[in-house]
Amino acid sequence: MTKIEWVARQGTIPESWNPIGGCEAISDGCQNCWAARLAATRLKHHPLYEGLTTRRSDGSYRWTGEIRLDYDEIFKPLHWHKPRTVFVTSTSDLFHYRVPDTYIKKEIWSVMVDCKQHTFLLLTKRPTRAFELLESHTPWPKNIWLGVTAENQQYAEERIPVLLQIPAAVRFVSCEPLLGPIQFHSMGTDTDCLDILSSTRWNENGIMNIPKVDWIITGGETGSRARPMHPYWARSLRNQCQVAGMSYFHKQNGEFMEVIDNFRDNDTVLMHDGKVLGRYDVWADKIIEKGYTVVRRVGKKQAGHLLNGKEYHQWPDT
């Protein structure tokens, strides 16, 4: 089982399935990779992970880039009888270029197709390879969902348009760790607007044809080296989802919480764009103008998962 909140759909057992070990940093969200830390600590003697990470001078862990395949693990879902929601390769990336094509297209795909009682969630930072391998899979099985990680505007604009070209039954975006503001309505191309907030779009035959995302997940970064999430970023994505009628899931606020008054010297001052100005005692006399927020590191548990005092745990209607 897994404790990842957005895998815990009602009526199913939350599960992770890891027939692959190892990964490689590819973008800003990888800086403090929780999976690399897990592999280097709790799983360091597991044959699938042993020796796959290195410790950097700043104390963080990084994957070496080596990939291992676990052919015993691959058949596990065939023995799960009760319906499960399964996070596939939760400690790796299924579409890493070192994972063989046949392993993805035949071995893993076949197991997911055969296990129709389960729902499989594929999450990647490498949607271009997913497109190359899977865009021809039509009709797409209803029990396989495909998502991309978008930690800020740059990667949202790079990855989401590729995701929208893949005919997945359910498409989702994980904005975790959320490291900057994201405005979905700014994305598009010269030939075909890929504005995922559009609710009405028609082709030449008058038939509604909407490439869209079904589900947005947000969450702050956790761990000893966590970067603060500006609370506005999550609230903005929540509002965008409400306008578009998309499901929205806020997992957690990370290690920090917003402070309105009674500031402390070691509180952190953030700008709207995510720039960390520094400690409150240094900036207290310089932040008269609007556009800043003060946050305090209180730990994941105390920071919690509520936005404006409300829980947002929505899943797509399938």
Image (cartoon, grey):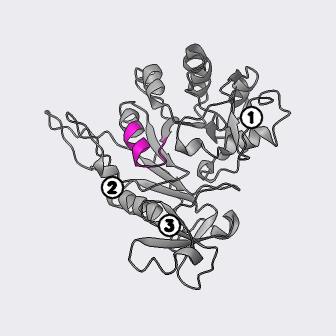
Residue 241: x and y in percent read 39, 57
Question: Against 75, is 83 above or below?
Answer: below
Residue 310: x and y in percent read 52, 71
Q: Earlier in the sequence, mark 1 or mark 3?
A: 1
Tell which tag, 2 or 1, sits nearer the viewer: 1
Image quarter of residue 302: bottom right
Q: Earlier in the sequence, mark 2 or mark 3?
A: 2
Residue in the picture at 52% in, 81% down: 260
Relative depth, front residue between 165 and 112: 165
User: Which residue position is annotated with label 2?
Assistant: 244
Describe the element under mark 2 as helix, strand or loop.
helix
User: Which residue position is annotated with label 1?
Assistant: 54
> Which stretch did the figure color magenta?
149-158
Q: Amino acid at mark 2?
A: Ala
State the count of labels: 3
Describe the element under mark 3 as helix, strand or loop.
strand
Q: Earlier in the sequence, mark 2 or mark 1?
A: 1
Name the quarter where the N terminus is drawn: top right
Whether residue 153 appears in magenta in the rendering, the answer is: yes
Question: Which residue in the rendered view is the most extreme toward the bottom?
Answer: 262
* Residue 82 in view here: no
* Residue 27 in view here: yes
Q: Amino acid at mark 3?
A: Leu
User: Which residue position is annotated with label 3?
Assistant: 270
Residue in the picture at 25% in, 37% down: 189
Relative depth, front residue between 285 and 206: 285
Residue in the picture at 76% in, 22% down: 72
What is the distance, in whole Å, between disc 2 and disc 1 at their CAs?
Answer: 43 Å
